[in-house]
Image (cartoon, rainbow, N blue to C red):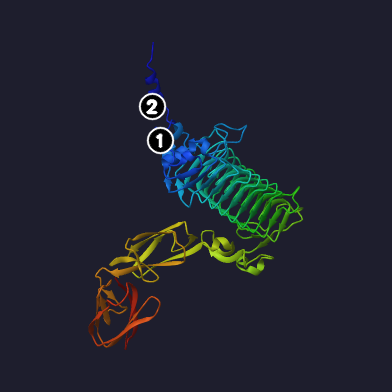
Amino acid sequence: MKINARIIIMLIVLFTGTIPYIQSQTIQAKAPKGWDQKTGGSIHNIEELLWLSETTEAWDEDWTLEADIDASETINWNNGLGFSPIGDSPNGFGVRQEIAFTGTFDGQGYSISNVYILRPEEPYIGFFGQATGAQIINLHLQNIHIEGHQYIGGLIGYADYNTIINNCSANSYVNGEDVNGGLIGQCYQGVQIESCWSDGTVSGNMWMGGLVGDLYAYCNISNSYSHSETQGTDYLGGLTGSARWYASINNSFATGDNLGSGEFVGGFVGHISDGVITNCFSSGRSQGYMRVGGFVGESLQSENSESGVYKSYSTGLVSAGEFTGGFVGRNYNYVNDCYFDIETSGTTIGIGNDDSGMEAIGILTADFAQENNFNNWDFSLVWTESVNYNISSFFRPYLKWYQQNLFTISFVSEEGGSIVGDSLQSIYLGEETTEVSIIEDLNYHFVGWYDSEGILYSTNKTIVIDNVDSDEVYIAHIDLISNTARLQNDKECVFFPNPVQQVLTLVAKEPSIIEIINMNGKLVREYRISNNCDIDIRFLANGVYTISVQNQRGTTKQKFIKQ
């Protein structure tokens, strides 16, 4: 009996719940204008980005990104495999074109978001698969979902031979078997990473790093950080899974948890072999079976006589079996002027093996607030003591380059309302976002958000603050539903309306001295009244003012808003 093939396909789809629905690809590749000169060009939209991912002869040229791009459509590309990485795997390992990206790519501060790369059987996977002698700068990737086999990174799967990565970031989910990083899977031979960061999740088996999976052979990371969590078995680190053979890391930090089930797990680096780390810190949790440390899982020296860890600290909780240390799990390398928190780490043992010949100094949480507790540290150029609520509510030494880019955002509510949201006080990098909302009490209504100078910021109850470049204060102004502002004793004096545009009416029960004071505390105008009066306030600049009423009963004050 003949059976219609289409009926069989329909039955498979109906009774197999694991087959995803993949839409057909609707975007058509479009070459950027002017590319016919073969000198590179500009990427403006998703069509041109698709073209670049498919055009290998353009991978040795110079490119700039000219706009933010939402790449959600990539989930439908290439029959469900998603975006095809720009630059492919090294010769001998190729599964696509075996052609590296060797040109330059300047993101100019723009972001590409919602990129999907779903290639679990393929190695060398990232937005750039392989970058050789390339330069990638000022590019930010948001909400990147990447699945591959080996050498997987949010930005680059495999970078080698003096590739430069500067001011780049990735917010990503990265999953693969081995050698995975939130930003880069593996760096080899002189790769330079500076002013880069990552956050998200990195998962797999071995060599998992929040920023880089494996840093190998004269590669360097400086002024960079990771908030990414790593999950796997062996060689897990908050910043990098391993740093080996003359690799170096300077002035960097990691805050993400590192959840391993095997060996070589560290809050900052899982394993060091002839690598050098200076002026760094970590705060994430480190979990594994053995060779687990708050900062480094294991540190070894064979060829590089200067290798080891210098002037660094860790504060994260450490849990493991054999070879567990608040700073290093197992050490045969230099550890100089390094510290760990004996309270937050859960241990008083700095180095897990007692034959190391080195010492990591354990101090109390409160001791981290004192500069003189850190021998030979530079608190004029490198470090600064402060609180960073994104990392800890305690005073800690933080890297000065990072703290200079942090700003304090405070939110205040007048009587009659409360604030909910991310935080009433938020310290964060300028590119991050804080959202808060005002909740009015009964019989009160919200007027608006004003800054510290009394300038109206927004009349929306919910505000989103981002791209801040200085410390800021936002005040939620509240008024009675009757729209009449009252002093502490409403039998003495009332004034209305509030907010006011032209004339403020005062009703007093006895002779009083009225003062109008600006937000800087400066007296703007003084009046003497016997009972009722109208005050023309059109001369005032828009903003928030305080009205002070003085009489025989004392002094009372209340704010009003000039619109």
State the image quarter where residue 521 is shown.
bottom left
* Residue tagged 2: 14
The reply to whether residue 85 is visible in this rendering is: no
Q: Residues within 10 Å of mark 2 (few under 14, many from 20)?
A: few
Question: What is the spatial separation of the Cα atoms under label 1 and label 2, in whole angstroms?
Answer: 31 Å
Position of the N terminus, as image quadrant, is top left
Left or right of residue 455: residue 201: right
Name the one closer to the observer, 532 or 35: 35
Q: Amino acid at mark 1?
A: Gln
Q: Amino acid at mark 2?
A: Leu
Q: Element at badge 1?
A: loop
* Residue tagged 1: 28
Residue drawn 32% across and 65% down? Answer: 448
N-terminal label among 1 and 2: 2
Q: Residues within 10 Å of mark 1 (few under 14, many from 20)?
A: few
Residue drawn 42% across and 38% down? Answer: 30
Judge whether 18 appears above or below 249 on screen: above
Residue 561 percent location from the top left of the image: 31, 72
Left or right of residue 393: residue 519: left
Residue 106 percent location from the top left of the image: 51, 49
The reply to whether residue 241 is visible in this rendering is: yes
Residue 261 percent location from the top left of the image: 61, 43
- Residue at the front extreme of this rendering: 37
Residue drawn 54% across and 65% down? Answer: 387
Left or right of residue 270: residue 47: left
Mark linked to residue 215: none
